[in-house]
Image (spheres, grey):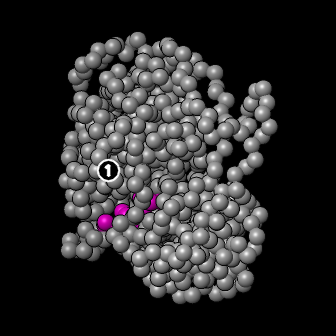
């Protein structure tokens, strides 16, 4: 295969073979001891929460105190989130258990993981009914009550120069007690482990596949073929994707006065450069050893595979003009300028964007729009704590006291993991994700506009991007290998993708990633139609909701942009789909050119 490529020329794509997928690998979950942090931070609010949590152990119905800072979410949610986070940490196979410096933690768990002694104290004091809760109920009641007090004292005292000796001793004892309670008893040794059994934490990483496997030319020492379709003939991949492009919805033109071609021209055919050049992600002061999975995919042969496929995709107008400008939001900003004036528009749009993007974690874009615009509405109404408390509740669990204004907002598991970064943004101006989180930070920047700042240099590494690049085949972990990238993987892959894939195509990295999402979608797990950008999806959601409510779509558009209402995808039409797109059936679109 040629090492050189120019737009319009193609490498030896006929040499790509459609080989059958390899035999499925049987994987097992390693036994993971629960690890507690060694240090934490504190605040007066946390001290009060600790006192309240301790009281809850004795009086489950005790009313919560009024928070000092309205941005702090309520104690009940705090306890629930701590327990959920602990369960996530316990269940996932992560780097130390497999001697890998990579993280595949879903965003819902990434920032929810307990950080301070207080987090763990609350988890112990009110354990809940999940996996971790059942284990923690084995601890004596007195010890659980003492845990909350010790956690609060340890965390609070550190703000004034150090924790008390008694609190430190109690916390140390708690570490061992929790670890003992949560560490399962290993099974008896047998001649051969049965599928699904528990392995010792020192189980070595998965061995590489034999030479000559489907991924071998592109991924160094692959251990699996997680998504065999990504290695198919590039012409076939592009043809399958083009067959799934949906017609343009009339709401895009009706509500924002543009077409897909207009958005494509605004993007300068994918060549428009953002005015934010540095990524909003954590970077270590001293670069360490490159991540092993990343190292396995950043090679010329793999880059050429992606170039060949995307160059084939660019022959199809539906893919090129639908996916390249996926992130372009300028027309929505222009309408916001008309509503609030140019002086306020930049801040209003930035708040709107930052209130929505966290809801992309673990969700399709229609779900993100449904929940994100509802969060923005409640933020603008000064009722965001109500959204935090009720917004995640499933429809079949909603009683008569459920807020009517949220009635058609879709609930979901992991609600706290999506809602809390928005609360942090309201309080601090930052979402506050952890050091290994990159996807939503880059997604927020890619969804900006010139007036607020936007980035095009750093591809958004969602799960489908990760799969198309081949990273799952290089990860030596037995579970969770098909998730999106963490920071240790992305830091070398991001620049490589921009320089080795996007630049030869003549476009920026963000539009290249969007094109790749649509092109590889049928191979990476997207089950529905593609081709509509984010603005078109917002337009359709407003259109559908206005039709359902019997109101003027243009009025609902303005209400959504000003935070007076939310845009809701018709929930009955939702179909489980990929993280980025996920369109409901559009076969029954009405041909409405005018409102």
Q: Is residue 358 magenta?
A: yes
Residue drawn at x 25%, y 68% is: 346
Res 556 → quadrant: bottom left
Q: Is residue 419 magenta?
A: no
- Residue 449 lies, in percent from the top left, at 26, 58
Q: Secondary structure at mark 1?
A: loop
Task: Give the x, y percent position of residue 189.
Answer: 78, 33
Left or right side of 521 for 496: left
Quadrant in which the C terminus is drawn? bottom left
Classify 358 as above or below 73.
above
Q: Identify the residue at horizontal 22%, vertical 22% (top origin).
A: 6
* Quarter of the figure with the N terminus: top left
Using the image as rendered, state which of residue 595 and residue 537 is in the foreground. Answer: 537
Q: Is residue 223 above or below residue 420?
A: above
The structure residue drawn at horizontal position 64% and vertical position 50%, both measured from the top left corner, is 33
Q: Nearer the viewer, residue 152 or 326?
A: 152
Find disc 1 in the rendering and name its residue. 283
Circle 1 packing at 10 Å, graded few (<14), some (14-19), many (20+), is: few
Q: Residue furthest front?
A: 165
Tell me, yes or no, if residue 381 can be seen here: no
Left or right of 113: which side holds 43? left
Span shown in magenta? 349-359
Q: State left or right for residue 66 relative to residue 25.
A: left
Establish if 286 lies above or below 345.
above
Relative vertical location of residue 580 with respect to residue 516 in this rendering, above or below: below
Residue 487 position within the rendered picture, expressed as x and y whole percent measured from the top left? 39, 47
């Amino acid at each position: 295969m040629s090492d050189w490529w120019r737009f319009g020329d193609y490498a030896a794509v006929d040499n790509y073979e459609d080989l059958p997928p390899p035999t499925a690998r049987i994987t097992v979950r390693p036994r993971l001891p629960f690890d507690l942090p060694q240090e934490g931070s504190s605040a007066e609010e946390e001290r009060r929460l600790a006192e309240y949590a301790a009281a809850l152990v004795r009086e489950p119905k005790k009313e919560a105190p009024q928070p000092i800072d309205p941005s702090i979410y309520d104690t009940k949610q705090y306890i629930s989130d701590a327990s959920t986070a602990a369960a996530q940490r316990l269940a996932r196979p992560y780097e130390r258990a497999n001697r890998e410096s990579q993280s595949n933690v879903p965003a819902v768990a990434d920032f929810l993981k307990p950080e301070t002694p207080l987090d763990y104290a609350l988890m112990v004091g009110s354990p809940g009914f999940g996996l971790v809760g059942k284990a923690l109920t084995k601890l004596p009641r007195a010890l659980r009550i003492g845990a909350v007090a010790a956690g609060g004292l340890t965390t609070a005292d550190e703000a004034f120069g150090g924790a008390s000796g008694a609190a430190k001793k109690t916390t140390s004892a708690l570490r061992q007690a929790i670890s003992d309670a949560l560490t399962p008893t290993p099974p008896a040794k047998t001649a051969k482990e049965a599928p699904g059994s528990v392995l010792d934490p020192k189980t070595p990483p998965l061995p590489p596949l034999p030479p000559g496997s489907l991924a071998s030319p592109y991924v160094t020492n692959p251990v699996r073929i997680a998504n065999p379709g990504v290695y198919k003939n590039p012409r076939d991949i592009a043809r399958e994707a083009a067959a799934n492009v949906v017609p343009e919805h009339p709401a895009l033109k009706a509500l924002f006065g543009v077409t897909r071609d207009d958005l494509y021209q605004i993007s300068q055919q994918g060549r428009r450069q953002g005015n934010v050049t540095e990524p909003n992600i954590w970077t270590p002061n001293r670069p360490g050893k490159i991540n092993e999975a990343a190292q396995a995919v950043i090679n010329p042969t793999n880059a050429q595979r992606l170039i060949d496929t995307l160059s084939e995709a660019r022959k199809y107008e539906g893919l090129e003009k639908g996916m390249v400008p996926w992130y372009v939001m300028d027309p929505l900003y222009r309408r916001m300028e008309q509503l609030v004036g140019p002086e306020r528009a930049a801040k209003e749009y930035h708040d709107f964007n930052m209130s929505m993007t966290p809801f992309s974690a673990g969700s399709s874009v229609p779900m993100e729009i449904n929940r994100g615009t509802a969060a923005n509405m409640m933020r603008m109404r000064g009722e965001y704590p109500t959204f935090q408390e009720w917004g995640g509740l499933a429809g079949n669990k909603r009683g008569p006291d459920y807020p009517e204004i949220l009635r058609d907002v879709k609930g979901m598991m992991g609600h706290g993991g999506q809602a809390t970064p928005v609360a942090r943004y309201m309080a601090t101006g930052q979402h506050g994700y952890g050091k290994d989180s990159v996807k939503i930070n880059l997604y927020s920047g890619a969804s900006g506009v010139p007036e607020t700042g936007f980035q095009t240099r750093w591809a958004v590494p969602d799960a489908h991007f990760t799969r198309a690049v081949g990273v799952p085949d290089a990860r030596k972990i037995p579970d969770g290998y098909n998730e999106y990238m963490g920071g240790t993987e992305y830091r070398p892959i991001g620049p490589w993708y921009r320089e080795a894939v996007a630049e030869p195509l003549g476009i920026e990295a963000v539009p290249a990633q969007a094109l790749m999402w649509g092109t590889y979608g049928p191979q990476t797990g997207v089950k529905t139609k593609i081709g509509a950008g984010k603005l078109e999806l917002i337009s359709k959601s407003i259109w559908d909701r206005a039709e359902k409510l019997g109101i003027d779509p243009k009025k609902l558009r303005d209400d959504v942009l000003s935070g007076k209402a939310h845009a809701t995808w018709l929930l009955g039409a939702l179909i489980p789909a990929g993280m980025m797109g996920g369109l409901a059936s559009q076969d029954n679109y009405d041909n409405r050119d005018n409102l």
